[in-house]
Amino acid sequence: MSLSGAQLLVQTLISLEVKTIFGYPGASILSIYEELSKTHIHHILVSHEQHAAHAADGYARSSGQVGICLATSGPGATNLVTGIATAFMDSSPIIAITGNVSTALLGKDSFQEIDISGITMPIVKHSWIVRKSEDIPYIIEAAFDLALSGRHGPVLVNIPQNVLEHEIKSELEIFTRTKRPVKQNSFSDEDIDRAVEMLINASNPVIYAGGGVINAGAGTELVQIAQRLNVPVALSFMGTAAFPHQHPLYAGTIGISPSVALEQADVVCALGVRFSDRAVRHFSFGKNAKLLHFDIDPAEINKNFRTDAAVIGNIKETLPKVLERIPDSYRFKSKFQTFLAGSTEIFHANEAFGPQYIIEETARWLGEQAVVVTDVGQHQLWTAQYYPFSGTQQFLSSGGLGTMGFGLGAAVGAKIANPARSVVLFTGDGSFLMNCTELATLVSYRLPVLIIIFNNHALGLVKQWQDRFYSGNYTETILKRTLDFVKLAEAFGAAGFRVTDKNSFINALDKAIPELNTEKPVVIDVILED
């Protein structure tokens, strides 16, 4: 039996139960597309390769599975780079498969040749350049294992054109996926005992939870330990949806909400956070505060803050072990209850037409199971602050890299992964223009995503910085454009509505229902006062 490299690749993907690939064809990978056309794998043709990476990222974050993007050599591969970097910064498991020129042409500045492995080296867990067709199944298997093992992240597989097209007489058995045992935990019983001792002997303990809790699927365990200890829970931006915002122990999202609880804590129990500068510049620990850090990645321990004790492992496995060891008689009497009750009030006091009203009304309209996606800017921070996450919704946003243009591609991936759930994208007029071509993808594949544009005719967050630090000199941040987002949506085949007040917004939501029910995306252009 003879098999080409492309056939080996596609059969391997089938054996790994891959259902969806996001990509854009080109000459060096046409053999892959030829084989994909003969299979049940659902290929989503995006409008730009960057959005293929963002869609794979959104698919991965919202499903817990590996997301796969596919691009040709040269500019196709380099267009993936921003999306790969976004996934790397936020620990999202994607596999980027790229073509390249034939091996005989490598290093000769050939047409559409690029060293994509070298370019992406700092932003992937590992990259492979496949030299032999028979190696493809084993490399793809290893890529899956690596993307999902330990701290999740992207990997890259670069396959030259001749390797894809070369046929081998093969007796290779295309394997059925069997997960290799991967050591993800290095904690000991002594580590758990030390953690419990620190918590129950603390005077003012606080939990600070981040994206690692979400990646581990440990939201239930987070609620359990918070309630068992009766201590407040502050969240990092990437952990925004990890804990119910209406819970009496919710202490805000660091960098967005008040952080008094952390500043007064004597023990901070950090769960799956990396203490990024975006968060830590907004708070400081008490003078004698101790840090207890739970994380799957040992490289995060002592990286940005001195750690007094650490538990290295999957949080979904380590938190139950802590819970088991807390004495039945223990219940901490938190000093922060008055603060917490007061801090929650400020998020729900404004009924005027504006971002808070729009976000809260959308949340009420969507219900409990929505997937909430954002781009980057003021709307991103408003969403994290005002959306009443209950622990059942998902929140997809570019936290580490802060990638404008992330949102619509990620929403495509999220809707493909969650066809029965509502998907909403909150975006700004600046961000939306960076990814609006993916409206064509939503329309073509009948993906009913609700898109809400906060249109203040400015790059709002950058303009805000100019207010604060540059005496209001708004250099190139006022968007003097006459673009009509409603007509743009309609040109792509989506539905579009413009709103300027509460009544028109409610009417737009009412009109959106039948459009979404016919599998049509809906754009609501919300005009905000500058």
Image (cartoon, grey):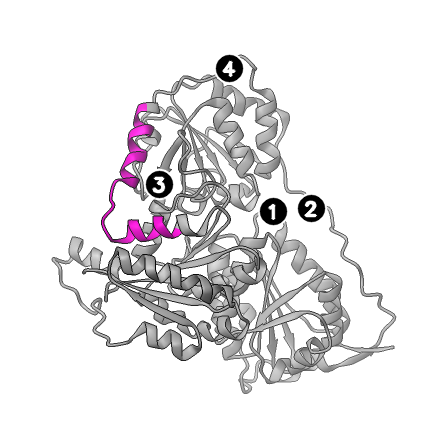
Q: Which mark is residue 182?
A: 2
Q: CA distance from mark 4 to mark 3?
A: 28 Å
Side (left or right) of 160 relative to 482: right
Residue placed under numbered mark 4 in the picture:
330
Do the residues bearing badges 1 and 2 touch, measured as CB atoms within 8 Å? Answer: yes
* Label 2 Cα crowd, 10 Å radius (few <14 / some 14-19 / many 20+): few
Is label 2 or label 3 in front?
Answer: 3
Q: Residue at x 63, y 36 (%)?
A: 186
Name the N-terminal-most of marks 2 and 3: 2
| Kind of residue sitting beneath label 1 | Gly
| Kind of residue sitting beneath label 4 | Tyr
Find out whether residue 83 is within the magenta segment.
no
Q: Is residue 11 above or below residue 417?
A: below
Residue placed under numbered mark 3 in the picture:
254
As helix, strand or loop, the secondary structure at mark 1 comes to loop
Name the N-terminal-most of marks 1 and 2: 1
Side (left or right) of 97 relative to 40: left
Quadrant of the frame with the N terminus: bottom right
Name the N-terminal-most of marks 2 and 4: 2
Is label 1 or label 4 in front?
Answer: 4
The magenta segment: 338-362
Q: CA distance from mark 2 to mark 3?
A: 33 Å
Q: CA distance from mark 1 to mark 2?
A: 8 Å
Do the residues bearing badges 2 and 4 touch, measured as CB atoms within 8 Å? Answer: no
Residue placed under numbered mark 1 in the picture:
150
Name the N-terminal-most of marks 3 and 1: 1
